[in-house]
Image (tube, rainbow, N blue to C red):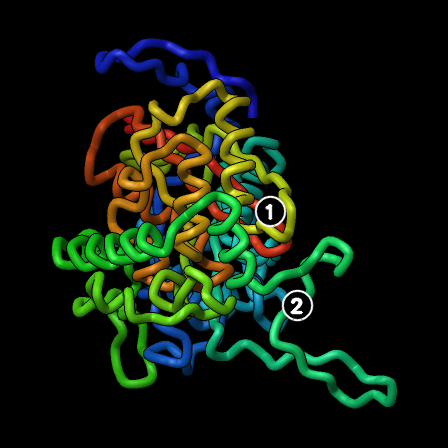
Amino acid sequence: MAELRRTPVPDGRARPENQPLPDDRQPVIIAARRTPVCRANGALKTLRAHELLAPVLLGLLADAGVSSSAVADIVIGNAVGGGGNVARLAALEAGLPVSVPGITVDRQCGSGLDAIVLASRLVAAGGSFGGGVYLAGGVESISTAPLRAHRGARGDPDFFSRAQFAPLSHGDPDMGVAAENVAARYGISRERQDDFALRSHRRAIAAAAAGAFGREIVHLAGANGPVTADNGPRRGLSGPVLARFPAAFVADGSVTAGNSCFDADGAAAVVITSLRHARELGAADGLLVLGADTAGVDPQLLGIGAAAAGERLLAALHVTTAELDLVEFNEAFASQAIACLEQLGIDPERANLDGGALALGHAYGASGAVLVTRLLAQARRRGVEGQLALALISSAGGMGTAALLEYRTLP
C-alpha cells in the first residue's frame, strides 16, 4: 500500500490525506465480531474451533448486510488446531454456500491479524469477483486442540507440548523464558509488570460494566449453558495479591502467572471489502487499512517483534506515535507489552483502553483479530473522523505484525 500524503486537520495534527489507493481497491473493515474469550478448559471447552467461528461468520454477514453467496473468500488464522483448513470447515458449519472457499494461515499468535492483513491485500490487488467481500480473522480452541507427537524410530508416538519455532542454534525459548529475557534486556521491573497487569484487569472490568463489549460479542451455547461474556477479568485482584505470585518460568525471575496472560478459547473476525463496495452496501463507517508490516527479531527476544514491525510501518507511512489515537497491543506478557510500547515511544497508559489479554486471555490464533475488533468498537464509540489506530502483536519464533487503520465515515 502506497506512501501517504499528509494534510493538516482542525486539531492541528497532520493526517494521512484520504487513502493511497483508488476506492475500488482501498480495503476497509466495516464490521467486526467476536465470541466471548474464556479460559481454556472452561465455559467453551466443548466447542471445537469451527464451532466457535461459525456463529461469528453468521453475525458478520447479518451486521454488514452481505449475502453469503457474495463472499469472495474466508481467511482465518489458527495456531494449534488440527489442520484440515478450519476456515472452510467453519464456512460449511455456518451454512454458507459450497461455492464460498476458505484458507487458513498460521503465524502463531499473529495469525488472526495476519489473516486480516492478507484479506486487505487481496482487496487492494483487485483480484476477486464483484465487490470483493472477505471474512477474515482467527480462532483458537485450546481446550480441544489435538495432542501432538513425533514418530519415534519404531513409529511409536513421542508427544510434545509445543512446536519448534527456531533452530536450536538460534535458541528456541519457551514463551515465559523469552518474556524473562525481554524483562532483563529492557529493564522492566516486577513492580511495573504487576501494575500493568492490574490496570488491564481494572480496565476490562470497567469496560464490561459500561457495556463496551456488548455489541461485538456473539453469544454461544457453552458446556453449562449460554456464554455471553468474557470470564477472565478478576475483580478481587490487587497489588498485594499480585506481589504474592512466585516466579513462573525462571528461578528468582519477575514474570509470574499474575503478569502473564492465560490460555483461552475464542474467535474473532471482520468484514473487509473495497471502499467503493462498502458504500454500495450502505455501510455507515469503517476502518481503512492504510498499511501493515511484519518484521523478524531475535527468537530469544521474541516478544519484541511487534515493536520492530510497528517502527518500520510507521516510518514508511510517515506517521508518528504522537498522532495515534488508539492502540491495541496483545498483552501476552506485561514485560513485552511495556518494552514494545516504550520502544515505539507510546506511553503504556495510552494502549488497551478497555484492558487486554492479561485480563481477557490469549486465544492464540484469534488474538490479533480481537485487537482489530476492539479498535473498531473504540473508534465508533469516540466517533471522531480520521482517528488513527494501530494494532500490534508479537509471535513465536521472533516476529511481530503491525497494522495501521483510519476511522472514516462513509457517506
x then y, percent, for residue 248? 45, 70
Q: Which element carries disc 1, helix, strand or loop?
A: strand
Left or right? Give the position of 296 relative to 183. right
Q: Residues within 10 Å of mark 1 (few under 14, many from 20)?
A: many
Above or below 390: residue 224: below
**Residue 305, picture quadrant:** top right
* Residue at the limit of the structure toward the front, as seen here: 252
The residue at 40%/62% (across/down) is: 260
Q: CA distance from mark 2 to mark 1?
A: 15 Å
Tell me whether the residue at label 2 lies in contact with that at label 1, contact meaning CB atoms closer than 8 angstroms: no
- At which x and y percent is residue 152? 81, 84
Kindly tell me whether residue 65 is visible in this rendering: no
Q: In the picture, which quadrant includes the N terminus?
A: top right
Q: Mark 2 — residue?
A: 163
Task: Work out whether residue 156 or residue 122 is closer to the camera in this orientation and state it.
Answer: 156
Q: Secondary structure at mark 2?
A: loop
Tell me the amino acid under the disc marked 1. Answer: Met
In this rendering, does residue 163 appear at all? yes
**Mark 2 vs 1, N-terminal side:** 2
Residue at 42% over, 68% down: 247
Residue type at tag 2 = Ala
Screen quadrant of the C terminus: top left
- Residue 399 image label: 1
Label drawn at residue 362: none
Q: Is residue 289 left or right of residue 201?
A: right
Picture layout, residue 408 above or below residue 170: above
Tell me the quarter of the picture where residue 100 sits. bottom right
Residue 362 vs 203, above or below: the answer is below
